[in-house]
Image (cartoon, rainbow, N blue to C red):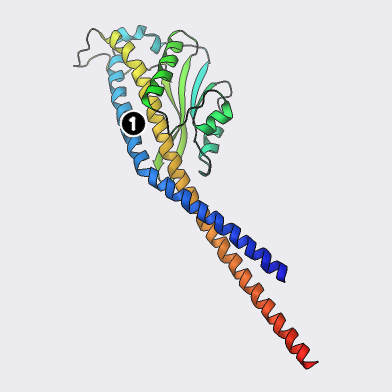
Amino acid sequence: MGADIKSLRTRIKSVNSTLHLTKAMGLVASSKIRRATEAMLHGRDYAAALGQVLGLLTADPSCARSPYMAQREGGRTRLIVIAGDRGLAGGYNANVFRLTREYPDAEVLPIGKRACDRFGGETRLCEDMDSLSAAALSAELCRDFADGKYDRLGILYTRYVSMMSQQPEVRWVLPLTRGEGGGNHTVLFEPDEMTILQTVVPEYVTGEIMSAVRESFASEVVARRMAMDSAGKNAQQMIDDLQLQYNRARQGSITQEITEIVAGAGA
């Protein structure tokens, strides 16, 4: 009986330590949520604005000659895979890697420590990713695409739907698709549409990378917050159950001691 009580006390202490850890990690994630979601919304707006400009440019027939609009038959794919910098975020990282398996022949460019650990290559952290790093990556990707070193570029990231839902998906960036309108617009591009398109595309790819990184990071911290809340509730429930077992064991031990004392006195 004494051994059972000691074991239960040890387990309660262990689970209680886990509870404190999950609460601390949940608080850290909560402190990052507002800043991460604000950055995500700004990234969405910037990417949408660049997308509107590209829509006008690609609708012009003269831009059809751009190498960025070349629809090639080859299947050489480069895939930027964005995962988390840390674990303990529920199924966040696992869902990203599960979707990555649908593109077994893709050349993966990882962003996020977990993705870099899995796929190798240069370590790029989501939280530390800035526009200069994204611009350098974009310049390399655009140059290689124009030189025909690969046929399409996608970004595998996690789309933020709500606090309760984050969905991994692939956003295809290159080649560009023709915009609607056939070039009938009132915007005047100087010196000409083709020149502006060639200049805007690297900025567009940079914006898409930063937008996806910020959205993935917001999804990560929200997923971690929800996972820590769930883990905390489970730990508290386990502590309550163990405490009940401990109290019953203590009561049984006291009852046994009293019985032994009474039996000894009667003898």
Query: With respect to residue 133, does 69 lie above or below?
Result: above
Secondary-structure class at tag 1: helix
Query: With respect to residue 109, does 169 lie above or below?
Result: below
x then y, percent, for residue 182: 28, 14
Q: Which residue is mark 1?
A: 43
* Number of numbered labels in the structure image: 1
Question: In the figure, is residue 193 to the left or right of 88?
Answer: left
Which residue type does callout 1 highlight?
Answer: Gly
Quadrant of residue 155 in the image? top left
Quadrant of residue 103 in the image? top right
In this orientation, which residue lies closer to the viewer: 36 or 49? 36
Where, quadrant-wise, is the N terminus in this rendering?
A: bottom right
- Residue appearing at x 32%, y 12% in the figure: 199
Query: With respect to residue 18, does 178 lie above or below?
Result: above
- Residue appearing at x 58%, y 24% in the figure: 104
x then y, percent, for residue 257: 71, 81
Question: Which residue, as the protein is rendered here, is positioned at the far right?
Answer: 267
x then y, percent, for residue 37: 35, 40
Tell me, yes or no, if residue 180 can be seen here: no
In this orientation, which residue lies closer to the viewer: 143 or 116? 116
Question: In the figure, is residue 130 to the left or right of 190?
Answer: right
Tell me, yes or no, if residue 191 can be seen here: yes
x then y, percent, for residue 42: 31, 33
Question: In the figure, is residue 241 to the left or right of 221?
Answer: right
Query: With respect to residue 19, does 68 lie above or below?
Result: above
Task: For label 1, count other residues whose C-alpha is less than 10 Å away and answer few (under 14), some (14-19) or many (20+).
Answer: many
- Residue appearing at x 45%, y 50% in the figure: 26
In this orientation, which residue lies closer to the viewer: 34 or 123? 123
- Residue appearing at x 37%, y 22% in the figure: 132
Quadrant of residue 267 in the image? bottom right
